[in-house]
Amino acid sequence: MNGPAVSVLLPVRDGAAHLESALRSLRRQTFADFEVCVEDDGSTDATFALAARAAARDPRVRPSRSAPEGLVAALNRAAARARGRLLVRMDADDLCHPARLERLWAAAHETPAARLLGSAVRYAPRRVLTPGMLRYERWLGTLQTHADVWRARLTECPIVHASWALDPALVRELGGWREGPFPEDYDFLLRTLAHGARTRVLPEPLLTVRLARASASRRDPRYGAEAFARLKLAHLCAWLAAEPRPAWIVGAGPSGKAWARRLLAAGVTPAGFLDPRPGRAGQRILGLCVRAPAALPPPQEGVLLLCVGHGPGRAQAAARLRAAGREEGRDWLRLH
């Protein structure tokens, strides 16, 4: 028997407080040809009972449970038993826009080369959002094309994990999600891009991501700034290894120096720093020379790593690079 068009991968542990509303948002979808692979990862609350009750009402809900092994194992188990031709991610505390599955299914057929799709998201509750979260939410809404995602890949994770729609064959080719001292979603996305797979992001917020105060992303070191930086560094070094041009760091402030230290520790020596602040030119920082932006090497003689914190300085530096004819993603990258 043919399977459904879409399989929703919904891993959960102790999600009884929100699971019913998440499943309700799926029942209200304008697209009906789907299944929900609820993967209970060792819950100690009423999660599995709620999932079983939902399955009794709606056979599209397919719950399973196992001993607690963590999110990565739960995701891989759900993907292994999914029957759909498109895998859609969701967490138990998320809420789907009624047209979410319809739009993702249509986008997968409109852009068949895109093997990982996503959408903008809205975070909730709004009262707990920090300025950084609001800035990230706005930034996500500016990314749509594969080129956008490629350029942004080492700035932040450019597609929110819970918003993804995936080609099942891509999951198999990459060996699924990986366990390690890093965020599994960002690792999967960077491997997707390194694999040569195309991406696309729908601009409308098709998912509401509820931020639980005790969520893993707020307390687990795998989702901390240094864990993200280690992943970025590995992929940055791979990119630079294939790049014949030397790398210059734009910005000799805290961010630029942090990235210089990481690169030096990884055995990659930048050509130096470019910094417009008075008195910086001619200095040596971490053994590297500092030049004024007027000494910017021509594109064929250097790639640039923009390491300027959020704010007007970063936007101005990016504008100057574009005005100088530098193509982001080819001649320069933003790092954060």
Image: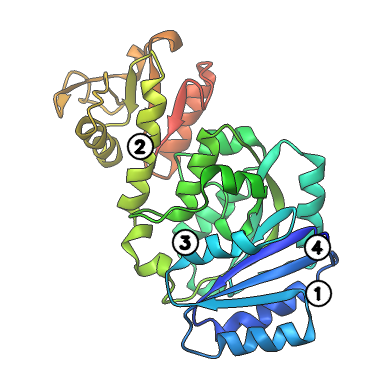
The answer to whether residue 98 is seen in the rendering is yes
- Secondary structure under the numbered disc 4 in the rendered image: loop
Question: Is residue 77 shown left or right of residue 22?
Answer: left
Looking at the picture, tell me which residue is in the foreground, 189 or 68: 68
Label 3 to label 4: alpha-carbon separation: 27 Å
Q: Which residue is mark 3?
A: 72
Which circle's residue, 4 or 1, is located before the other in the chain?
A: 1
Q: Amino acid at mark 2?
A: Ala
Judge from the rendering whether residue 240 lies leftward or rightward of residue 322; answer left or right: left
Give the CA separation, mark 2 to mark 1: 42 Å
The picture places residue 270, in percent across and down from the top left corner, at: 27, 23
Q: Amino acid at mark 4?
A: Ala
The disc, 3 or 4, on the residue closer to the chain's N-terminal end is 3
* Mark toward the start of the polypeptide (4 vs 2): 4
Q: Which tag is nearer the camera, tag 1 or tag 3?
A: 3
Q: Residue tagged by mark 1?
A: 28
Q: Nearer the viewer, residue 97 or 43?
A: 43
Using the numbered discs, state the Cα–Cα distance from disc 2 to disc 3 in whole angstroms.
21 Å
Which mark sits nearer the N-terminus, 2 or 3? 3
- State which quadrant residue 26 falls in: bottom right
Measured in 3D between alpha carbons, the distance from the residue under mark 4 to the one under mark 2, in whole angstroms, is: 37 Å
Residue sitting at 80 percent across and 62 percent down?
4
Given this view, does label 2 or label 3 mark the residue nearer the observer? 3
Q: Is residue 308 visible?
A: no
Residue displayed at 68% across by 64% down: 8
- Look at mark 4 in the image and give the residue it sits on: 99
Horizontally, is 192 left or right of 222 in the view?
Answer: right
Please say if 40 is above or below 291: below
Residue that carries the numbered disc 2 in the rendered image: 234
Disc 2 secondary structure class: helix
Question: Helix or strand or loop: what does disc 3 sit on?
Answer: helix
